[in-house]
């Protein structure tokens, strides 16, 4: 049995477009890759009672989330023929229009990359102990719930 | 050693804290009952319980040093 390596997926604040660009660029040397699939989650300006969301503040149960993410990662690698898999999720405050989730899968062919990416996003949303608090422009708050 | 209870998400607002140390409890039902007595809003709030990072669905025995987490439905991404 190999040593279990727990990767940290969390980044403080928004995920910059530079980080996403750098991540794509760093795969240029892996020439067995033929397809990348990328999912980006963006903070939406939801409206409620005439008020608009200004930002979402994310918190998590880090130990449990990283352990669970490790399990998800292993099961996705077992199911799909992937070359790489990268997941980043924001913690703390992320403003409307900014990126809070970045999921990146690479494979020889498109189908594996797309299907794995899609399954990963669903697992992240429903299985990781992460919570988002919507902060409205008037500073009132509403706790988000994934549907 | 006691039992450490962590609150997450909206439960932090309800209880006014993210962490609480409690004296030994026999099981999660007993612990839950005390917490609901101290914070009645919990009774009408949906949450899951994990013991040492494992989600539990039924009553679970507790031992000194256990870490209990109360978690509302997840909303990451």
Image (cartoon, grey):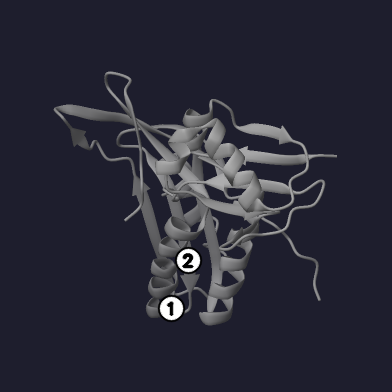
Snapshot quadrant of residue A83: bottom right
State whether residue B51 is above or below residue A113: above
Sort mark 1 into few (<14), some (14-19) or many (20+) by Cα contacts within 10 Å. many
- Rendered residue at 54%/64% (across/down): A85
Judging depth in this view, the residue of B28 and A141 nearest the camera is B28
- Rendered residue at 43%/78% (across/down): A112
Q: Secondary structure at mark 1?
A: helix
Snapshot quadrant of residue B50: bottom right
Judging depth in this view, the residue of B62 and B30 nearest the camera is B30
For mark 2, name the chain.
A
2 and 1 marks in contact (CB < 8 Å): yes
- Rendered residue at 63%/62% (across/down): A70
Quadrant assignment for the C terminus of chain A? bottom left
State whether residue B39 is above or below residue A30: above
Q: Secondary structure at mark 2?
A: strand
- Disc 2 designates what residue? A105
- Disc 1 designates what residue? A112
Snapshot quadrant of residue A93: top left
Res A62 visible: no
Sort mark 2 into few (<14), some (14-19) or many (20+) by Cα contacts within 10 Å. many
How many marks are shown on the rendered structure?
2
State whether residue A136 is above or below residue A127: above
Res A99 visible: yes
For mark 1, name the chain.
A
Image location of residue A62, percent across then percent down = 62, 46
Quadrant assignment for the N terminus of chain A? bottom right
Image location of residue A101, percent across then percent down = 43, 49
Image location of residue A90, percent across then percent down = 49, 41
> Relative to residue A37, is residue B56 drawn left or right?
right
* Residue, far left: A50
* Residue, far top: A138
């Amino acid at each position: 049995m190999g040593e279990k390596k727990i990767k940290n997926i969390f980044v403080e604040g928004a995920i910059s477009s530079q980080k996403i660009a750098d991540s794509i660029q760093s795969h240029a040397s892996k020439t067995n890759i033929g397809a990348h699939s990328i999912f980006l989650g963006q903070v939406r300006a939801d409206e409620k009672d005439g008020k608009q969301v200004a930002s979402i503040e994310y918190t998590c149960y880090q130990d449990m989330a990283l352990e669970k993410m490790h399990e998800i990662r292993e099961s996705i690698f077992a199911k799909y023929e992937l070359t790489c898999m990268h997941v980043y999720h924001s913690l703390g405050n992320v403003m409307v229009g900014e990126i809070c989730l970045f999921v990146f899968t690479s494979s020889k062919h498109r189908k594996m990359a797309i299907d794995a990416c899609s399954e990963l996003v669903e697992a992240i949303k429903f299985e990781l102990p992460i919570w988002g608090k919507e902060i409205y422009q008037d500073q009132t708050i509403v706790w988000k719930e994934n549907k | 050693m006691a039992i450490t209870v962590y609150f997450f998400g909206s439960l932090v607002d309800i209880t006014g804290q993210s962490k609480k140390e409690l004296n030994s409890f026999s099981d999660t039902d007993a612990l839950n009952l005390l917490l609901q007595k101290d914070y009645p809003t919990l009774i009408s709030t949906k949450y899951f319980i994990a013991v040492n990072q494992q989600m539990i669905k039924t009553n679970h025995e507790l031992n000194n040093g256990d870490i209990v987490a109360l978690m509302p439905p997840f909303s990451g991404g």
